[in-house]
Amino acid sequence: MIYFIGAGPGAADLITVRGMNCLKRADLVVYAGSLVNPELLTYCPDGCERMNSASMTLEEVVSALTSRPAEQVVVRLHTGDPSIYGANREQMDALDRLGHAYEVVPGVSSLNAAAAALNVEYTLPGVSQTLIVSRMAGRTPVPERENIRSLASHNASMALFLSVSMLGQLCAELIAGGYRPDTAAAVVYKATWPDQEIINGTLETLPGLAAHIGRTALVLVGDFLNGTVERSKLYDPAFSHMFREAKS
Ligand code: SAH
């Protein structure tokens, strides 16, 4: 069986129990070496073959994944959660065409790890109830209708992947799209790794403050970063719901 496993954001104990158990039984692991923490490979048994996909093509990855008999355990280890900028759909398509069964084990995304590092919540009552996850167009294009400027017009909470190398341009687009220049913004570099770094600023100041960060970072934007909040209805004593009667 082939398993696509989310490795989590970095720290080796942030893989899921299910993901770790698959690694413990693995005969072959193909891991995304540029972002997956090599410490995770210590969960693999001694005889397990390890291949770093950083220098491999899609064809080579697929050929490795399909090289073992169906009773063996083959793991494709992706950073964070595979469903977010994971490039795993193209691998699943190829396996579908070749008639190989596979299963996906979700992971903790850097989206979650960055919020945890900052002690923030993306969806605050009275601030924003929407989280927009996107990126700047780079060598991978972004559909024109999703350009940063138009997404910014919502003034929602935003998390931007794969964009920290274009931070100046990104912040300018966000302001042009309608965020106040003093909107809180943060860069979280290598969340949960030993060299994690957090840089807090505003859309105006962040490009200067985080100019030394070139990759492996999320850019977070929105008033949710300020942390002040209207209290939620869910835990309000005057609010009844399925599990609790309101107290007068
Ligand atoms: N599937 C991954 C994302 C892969 S795309 C996930 O769910 O997190 C790679 C991008 O993810 C990086 O360029 C960076 O923007 C972000 N990223 C991955 N790991 C990170 C980490 N530990 N801290 C901050 N950003 C990270």
Image: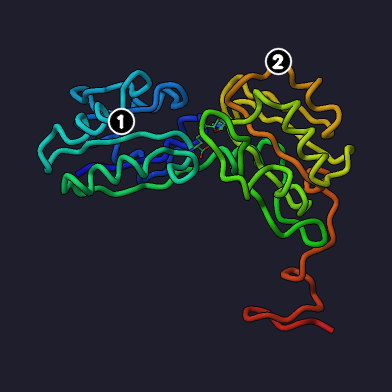
Which of the four quarters of the rendered structure image does ligand 1 lie in? top right
- Mark before the other along the chain sequence, 1 or 2: 1
Left or right of 13? Residue 231 is: right
- Is 126 left, or right, of 99 in this rendering? right
Amino acid type shown at disc 1: Leu
- Is residue 111 depicted above or below 10 in this figure? below
Q: Nearer the viewer, residue 210 or 106?
A: 210
The answer to which quarter of the image holds residue 52 is top left
Which class describes the residues within 10 Å of circle 1: few (<14), some (14-19), or many (20+)? some
The answer to which image quadrant residue 211 occupies is top right
Rendered image: mark on residue 212: 2
Mark 1 Cβ and ligand 1 under 8 Å apart: no
Q: Which residue is drawn at 36% across and 44% down?
A: 89
User: Could you tell me which residue is drawn at 63 percent across and 19 percent down?
Assistant: 214
The mark total stands at: 2
Could you tell me residue 119's position as x and y percent? 72, 42
Provide the residue designation for mark 1. 58
**Residue 87 location, x and y as percent?**
41, 38
**Which element type, helix, strand or loop, lies under badge 2?**
loop
* Foreground pick, 168 / 184: 168
* Cα gap from disc 1 to disc 2, whole angstroms: 32 Å
Q: Residue 29 carries which label?
A: none
